Amino acid sequence: MTERLQLTVIDRRDLVLGTGAVAALAAILPLSTIAMAEEKVTWKDAMKAVVGDSKPAEGKVSLDLPEIAENGNTVPFTVTVDSPMTGGDYVKSVHVYATGNPRPDVVSFFFSPQSGKAEATTRMRLAQTQDVVAVAEMSDGKFYMGKRTVKVTIGGCGG
Amino acid sequence: MAKPRVKIPKSAKVGDVVQIKTLITHKMETGLRKDKKTGEIIPRQIINSFAAKYNGKEVFRTKMHPAISANPYISFFMKVPGPGEFEFIWVDDTGKSWSTKKKLAVS
């Protein structure tokens, strides 16, 4: 509750500075992201588009990534979700976010009971050392997430 | 420009969970890069979706964003329901699509 009150105060101060749009965002985003809030979408916003108001539980989702990626242009990774993959209990989709990329969305995989195994592999670009997050939506509507940190030697967003 | 390549097992039994590996050549232009001479942003042009069907039924689908590397590689699994044919479809930002078919030998 106190946190919400504090944010309202900051909100007002920003309004005085005449940046209405930024202030509106400041009310919902952590302070550290305000500077880049204008056009950059945070990974939490991107994830919200998928999970809505529900909070994904930790677990079931594992990310297999190199600990150190020498070339950020092509970082291979595999995401696996623990599920029996039957008609009544399967993984509907998995969404991957690169939290430190200018655009955090990476990929969404959509599975079916016919998939047999909720596992997929691809290669992504990573701009810098960061956390990679994967969120899985189960057939019962529950969400689970997994996280891994990757060290990137040379960033791969072609500046 | 884009050339799809797919690898599936030579043969499989009903109920086996088989891995399918796919690759398509594509530059996957992010829309964030600038032309070094003119300073203008090079427009985004990526393959944004991939789907795999088996006997006409969708088994697996992928939505891709600019963070996917050039020449996108995707691998996934399928539980073999019986003999049949795969169809793989890639679509890029301009709506252009590429597809390829593969028969799975089931014993």
Image (spheres, grey):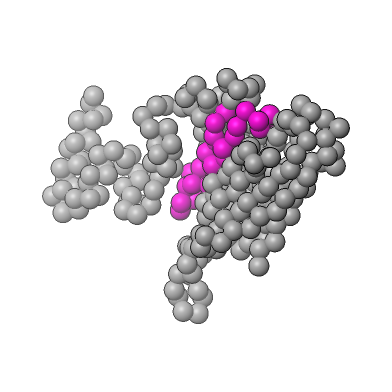
Q: Residue at x 59, y 58 (%)?
A: B97
**Residue ID at (79%, 41%):** B104
Magenta span contains residue A93 = yes
Q: Examine the rendered structure and indicate whether residue A42 appears above or below residue A79.
A: below
Q: Is residue A46 visible?
A: yes
Q: Quadrant of residue A11 in the image?
A: top left
Point out the residue furthest to the bottom here: B37
Of A121 and B2, nearer the camera is B2
Q: Nearer the viewer, residue A126 or A88?
A: A88
Q: Which quarter of the rendered picture does the N terminus of chain A lie within?
A: top left
Residue B75 horizontal side relative to residue A51, left or right: right
Query: Going 57% across and 20% down the picture, which residue do you hit?
Result: A88
Q: Is residue B57 left or right of residue A136?
A: right
Residue at the outermost left position: A16
The foreground one among A26 and B94 is B94
Q: Residue A69: image x %, image y %?
A: 65, 49
Across and down, in percent, residue A155 comes to 57, 56
Residue B19 left/right relative to A149: right
Q: Is residue A70 visible?
A: no
Would residue A29 be counted in the magenta stretch? Answer: no
> In the figure, is residue A147 to the left or right of B25?
left
Residue under the image location 73 percent in, 30 percent down: B81
Which residues, given as a range, are shown in magenta?
A91-117
Q: From this view, report whether residue B46 is shown above or below residue A33.
A: below
User: Residue A151's x, y, as percent?
Assistant: 60, 46
Above/below status of A82 relative to B90: above
Q: Quadrant of residue A8?
A: top left
